[in-house]
Image: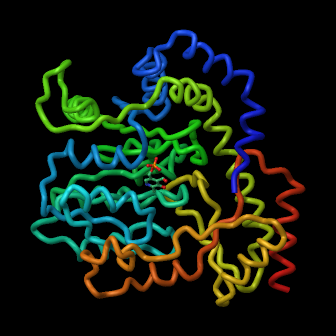
Amino acid sequence: MVDLKTQYARLKHKIDPAMASVIDSCEFIKGPALKEFENNLAQYLGVKHVIGVANGTDALQIAIMALGLQQGDEVLVPSFTYVATAEVIGLLGLVPVLVDVDLETFNIDVDFARQSITPKTKAIVPVHLYGQCAPMQEIMQLAAEHNLFVIEDNAQGIGGSYLFNDGRKVKTGTLGDISCTSFFPSKNLGCFGDGGAMMTNNDDLAQKIRMIANHGQPEKYIHSVLGVNSRLDTLQAVILNVKLEELDDFVTRRQAVALRYDKDLGGINGIYIADTASYSTHAYHQYTIRITNGSRDELQAYLKSKSIPSMIYYPIPLYKQQAFSAYHSGNEHTNTELLCKEVISLPIHTEMTEDTQSYIIQSLKSFFN
Ligand SMILES: Cc1ncc(COP(=O)(O)O)c(C=O)c1O
């Protein structure tokens, strides 16, 4: 699905010396390069605070803790997303209220979210699934009307921009009260292991996040609240510092691959390609189409026989997962059900060659002919 080896070979001349400098310094934990990366990412995104953490899941968990959400509070979250988004809510004793998604954007359905609000609802977690922005303007409006916190899950959206009705254009990952991202190696901005970050424009929240991520310590050996140990390693920070310089180019490369897929697969009967939302750019963490003639699983087997990887993100609605059975209202979500049966993600990455993509496209065409 991705070609990390070729990308590394292309950036090796910058990454290797950067890593060697950390190893030479032995400042593995909270070395100066971490602060440098946090500052660089804050500048890139246009946000006041960036706090590196150990992974994207921790970022979501710490966000809930920092916002002071309590056991029993309800949090709106899409039923069609990666498990981490909803998992941390249940883990902390809150209630993930699963919300259906929109068929075009694959993102949380705002009307469904509105109808799911109760007096216990305290937050909403939009996810920019596949790199397509959730409708943040509407979500923020809904949140303002009902006094909800917005925790923006930008793990798949980094590098994208959101366009407000008044013409303002801002980077995703700056829109929530707290925004969270993952630097998992295959992400648009990926490190060489696990990593994540949290973004906020709120000084108090930034301070709380730093404290919670560091065992609840405002200062050494003073523990004001129960916290966790969640740090972005200095080694990962220097790799990310190199890759951050490339992020816009990475996204442009992904968009070019997507554009060609759109053009060459667009007319095929049985394939549905959703339009990109008009209110944002698409960071194309994934290139995901719908197979509308019931042959998705056969297509995947066919692609496999041609040595073409593909993935189903995600095959099972969260409310049908055993771990979430307690949160199943009993009602199936029509769109989530359909997407779980129809979506398939094709290889998309920064190193895609024209020949490789031609082979993938030809193989898809021959399957549908
Ligand atoms: C939408 C979404 N949220 C959260 C996460 C969790 O990130 P991590 O794997 O770094 O914990 C991921 C990553 O896989 C993701 O895709």
Q: Quadrant of residue 362?
A: bottom right
Residue ID at (19%, 45%):
67
Q: Quadrant of the C terminus?
A: bottom right
- 145 vs 9: above or below: below
**Residue 343 x %, y %:** 59, 75
In screen coordinates, is 10 left or right of 369?
left
**Residue 177 x %, y %:** 27, 45
- 116 vs 259: above or below: below
Q: Quadrant of residue 79?
A: bottom left
In screen coordinates, is 294 left or right of 222?
right
- 361 vs 201: above or below: below
Specify how the rendered protein is coloured: rainbow
**Residue 114 x %, y %:** 25, 72
In screen coordinates, is 244 left or right of 270?
left
**Farthest top residue in view:** 25
Query: Residue 276 versus residue 165: which sits nearer the camera?
Result: 276
**Residue 296 x %, y %:** 66, 82
Residue ID at (59%, 80%):
342
In screen coordinates, is 220 left or right of 341?
left
Q: Quadrant of the N terminus?
A: bottom right
Q: How many marks?
A: 0
Residue ID at (32%, 65%):
77
- 61 vs 296: above or below: above
Q: Quadrant of residue 320?
A: bottom left
**Farthest bottom residue in view:** 293
